[in-house]
Amino acid sequence: MILSLPWIALSLAAYNVIVFVTGTPFEATIWQVPMLSGAVWNFTLGDLVVAGTLFLLFIEILKATRTGGNSLVDHAMSTIVFIICLIEFLALPQAATSLFFFITLIALIDVIAGFSVTIRAARRDFAVGPGGHL
């Protein structure tokens, strides 16, 4: 059951903690990297949240390749996380940011990709049977 919890919820929780508890601005520079061109790349807290959320999306897509009874629970939980993100984005002024929009968009991609990968994997498992046909 613990494996069915969507990892994208960690990004949602991290955003909410940063905004509502610490109040740290997402534009805060974490580190600076001097580039060969002479420019300086500023890596911000918002960049870290997006990068972390994309990594968690990768894990969610890998989880979607599993077949079994828990996949339905996994998809339902991912859908709930997306709905929570959407409600926060529309209803809370602290979530009306581009950063939170991208977290919501990644949660939507998680839902769509999860269902798509599971359906594709189930179709392939169903097609392989005794004698290679139905």
Image (cartoon, grey):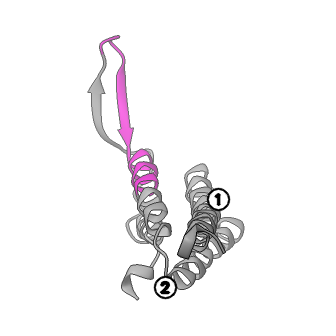
Q: CA distance from mark 2 to mark 1?
A: 33 Å
**Residue 129 visible in the shown view:** no
Which residue extends farthest front? Answer: 131
Quarter location, residue 81: bottom right
Circle 2 residue: 70
Which residue bears the numbered disc 1?
A: 96
Residue located 36% across and 33% down the image: 42
- Per the image, label 2 sits on a secondary structure element best described as helix
Farthest top residue in view? 37
* Residue type highlighted by circle 2: Asn
Q: Is residue 130 magenta?
A: no
Q: First in sequence: mark 2 or mark 1?
A: 2
Q: Amino acid at mark 1?
A: Ala
Label 2: few (<14), some or many (≥20) within 10 Å?
few
54 lies above or below 68: above
Check disc 1: other Cα within 10 Å, few if <14, some if 14-19, many if 20+: few
Coordinates of residue 122 in the picture (x, y in percent): 59, 72
Residue 58: x %, y % from top left:
44, 56
Tell me what residue is drawn at x 43 percent, y 45 percent. Answer: 47
Quarter that holds the C terminus: bottom right
Q: Pick the residue in front: 28 or 5.
A: 5
Q: Quadrant of the N terminus?
A: bottom left
**For the point 46% across and 52% down, which residue is it?**
54
Image height of 78 relative to 70, above or below: above
Q: What kind of element bears circle 1?
A: loop
The residue sitting at 40% across, 71% down in the picture is: 21
The image shows residue 85 at horizontal and vertical percentages of 61, 69
- Residue interval drawn in magenta: 36-55
